């Protein structure tokens, strides 16, 4: 990468900030000067990672899908996905100990695989993040109208068009909120996010205890396949792999804990812990919710279980009053999840922009002098997310395809980190930071498993299943093959632009470059 010699930036210098003796070492090594304000503590970084995963959001949004396609036995996909993602998280933790910087996936893939790999990984992650923000915002429609009919602001919700339009309206309000909060700086975001995560964690534990108190059958329910897989070439394995997407769609985003590294205190030590704690806590709490929900639902064969999901389980098992309280906690979880996704997207766009790897890089990478946050990326990501939401009004099939593909692009972006990292390990060119998190001798097998897992799950996610990419009629070939077509178009189109236009301009912008000594 070509680096531009640093010059004195316009405007007042950054405010003095408390920091450990090595907080900015990784920035200097990468050629950047510190600009973002370090205010986040250990819990803040943990909260960012766990709110992105957001157990209450993911389980309540996707439980129905797992049961519908795999029966109660789909529960086993939860520990399967956790095991695979743990391999990825361990690699990320080692990287976070050495390079806890904004836009972690982009910077890590750039460092490990070179500028071209880095740009492609960052581009895929950034595109996926904007779509994911829209997808999370849609979760309001799944929950709020079940709390009160008042939240069905457009019509009475009796038609798919009315529900889709209402989802866009509710989702747009949420995106506006996350845009405003992120625009006012990381400190406000962290306070709201941490409070929301605290409420979510308490609510999750209470929900587990309440479901446990209402169980009507034993844990052997997790072996019931409901006869799924009949008529499939792979039998139940085919049904299980489809149902496993419900778990794969939840357990990602733990890298956010490191992406806030430039705004965290002692990030080299805190970020690796936050990544692993967020994933492990999400696995444990989510696993209990899913299992106890299957054990507590009054009628396991009620059609509403595979249609309304956990919302139906909570209302039917715990009663209307307690159920409504739980659903309000789900709304809080959705809110902080959207906030975390938006926050991560801003840091990623800022990181790519200060390398002049995006159009208008200088403007996108500009840090607001008062709020010490990149303001333009917050607005731009919010606008794009709302524009994507609008697709849902008359084309819900297309939107379901796009949201599914967003997850594929995130898994692909993770591969852009773990695969080059494995190559470096095999060549003896990777060394973790001294005194920080290290896998030691386990590094090579863990890294290899992370690559195998990421490759296998990417293929599983992209497999052209009609029940995923064209669930309702009419059938269209371009929807069924939407994953391959869309991911290919985003990757090829984006990289073509980079190769012919942006590549020649790449280099740390002068106003963001570390000061050089004569």
Image: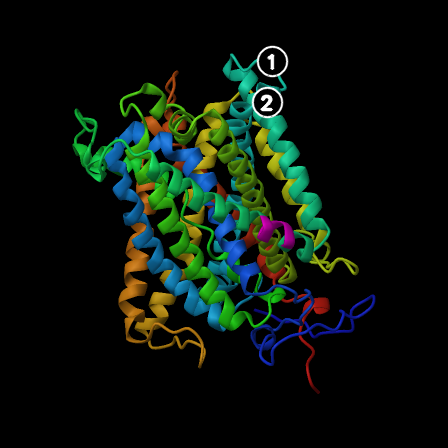
Q: Nearer the viewer, residue 396 or 223?
A: 223
Main secondary structure found in the magenta portion: helix
Residue drawn at x 28%, y 34% as measured from the top left: 295
Sequence order check, earlier mark of 2 and 1: 1
> Where in the figure is residue 180, as x and y percent of width and height?
71, 44
From the image, which quarter does the C terminus lie in?
A: bottom right
**Disc 1 crowd, CA 10 A, few/some/many (<14, 14-19, 20+):** few
> Where in the figure is residue 368, as x and y percent of width and height?
76, 57
Residue drawn at x 43%, y 60% as measured from the top left: 277
Q: Are marks 2 and 1 in contact (CB under 8 Å)?
A: yes
Please, what secondary structure does the residue beneath circle 2 have?
Answer: helix
Q: Nearer the viewer, residue 493 or 222?
A: 222
Quarter holding residue 435: bottom left
The colour mode here is rainbow
Quarter holding residue 48: bottom right
Please, what secondary structure does the residue beneath circle 1 have?
Answer: loop
Q: Which residues are magenta?
A: 191-195
Residue drawn at x 40%, y 48% as measured from the top left: 251
> Where in the figure is residue 402, as x and y percent of width and height?
47, 34
Q: Is residue 200 above or below residue 476?
A: below
Inter-mark Cα distance, 2 to 1: 8 Å
Residue topped by disc 2: 166
Quarter holding residue 353: bottom right
**Can the viewer see residue 27?**
yes
Label ID, residue 155: 1
Asked if the magenta segment contains residue 407, the reply would be no
């Amino acid at each position: 990468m070509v680096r531009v010699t640093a010059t004195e930036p316009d405007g007042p210098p950054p405010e003095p900030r408390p920091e450990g003796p090595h907080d900015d070492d990784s920035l200097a090594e990468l050629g950047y000067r510190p600009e973002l304000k370090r205010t986040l503590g250990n819990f803040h970084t943990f909260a960012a990672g766990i709110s992105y995963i957001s157990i209450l959001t993911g389980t309540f949004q996707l439980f129905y899908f797992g049961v519908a396609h795999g029966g109660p036995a789909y529960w086993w996909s939860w520990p399967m996905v956790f095991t695979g993602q743990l391999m990825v998280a361990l690699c990320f933790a080692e990287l976070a100990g050495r390079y806890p910087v904004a836009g972690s996936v982009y910077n890590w893939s750039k460092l490990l695989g070179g500028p071209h790999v880095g740009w492609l990984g960052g581009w895929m992650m950034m595109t996926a993040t904007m779509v994911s923000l829209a997808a999370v915002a849609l979760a309001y429609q799944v929950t709020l109208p079940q709390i009160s009919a008042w939240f069905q602001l457009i019509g009475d919700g009796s038609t798919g068009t009315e529900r889709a339009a209402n989802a866009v309206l509710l989702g747009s309000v949420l995106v506006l909120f996350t845009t405003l909060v992120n625009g006012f700086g990381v400190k406000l975001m962290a306070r709201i996010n941490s409070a929301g995560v605290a409420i979510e964690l308490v609510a999750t534990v209470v929900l587990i205890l309440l479901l446990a108190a209402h169980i009507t059958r034993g844990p052997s329910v997790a072996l019931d396949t409901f006869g799924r897989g009949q008529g499939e070439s792979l039998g139940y394995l085919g049904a299980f792999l489809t149902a496993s997407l419900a778990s794969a769609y939840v357990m990602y985003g733990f890298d956010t804990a490191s992406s806030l590294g430039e705004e965290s205190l002692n990030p080299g030590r805190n970020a690796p812990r936050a990544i692993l704690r967020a994933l492990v806590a999400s696995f444990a709490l989510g696993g209990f919710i899913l299992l106890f929900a299957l054990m507590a639902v009054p009628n396991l064969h009620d059609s509403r279980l595979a249609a309304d999901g956990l919302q139906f389980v909570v209302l039917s098992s715990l009663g209307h009053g307690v159920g409504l309280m739980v659903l309000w906690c789900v709304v809080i979880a959705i809110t902080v999840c959207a906030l975390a996704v938006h926050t991560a997207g801003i840091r990623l766009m800022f990181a790519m922009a200060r390398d002049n790897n995006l159009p208008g890089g200088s403007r996108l990478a500009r840090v607001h002098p008062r709020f010490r946050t990149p303001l333009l990326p917050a607005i731009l990501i919010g606008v794009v997310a709302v524009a994507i939401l609008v697709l849902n009004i008359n084309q819900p099939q297309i939107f379901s395809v796009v949201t599914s593909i967003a997850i594929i692009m995130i898994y692909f972006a993770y591969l852009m980190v773990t695969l080059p990292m494995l190559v470096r390990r095999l060549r003896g060119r990777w060394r973790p930071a001294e005194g920080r998190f290290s896998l030691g001798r386990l590094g090579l097998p863990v890294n290899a498993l992370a690559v195998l897992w990421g490759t296998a799950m990417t293929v599983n996610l992209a497999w052209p299943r009609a029940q995923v990419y064209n669930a309702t009629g009419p059938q269209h070939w371009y929807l069924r093959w939407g994953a391959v077509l869309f991911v290919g178009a985003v990757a090829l189109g984006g990289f073509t632009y980079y190769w012919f236009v942006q590549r020649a301009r790449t280099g740390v912008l002068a106003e963001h470059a570390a000061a050089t000594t004569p």
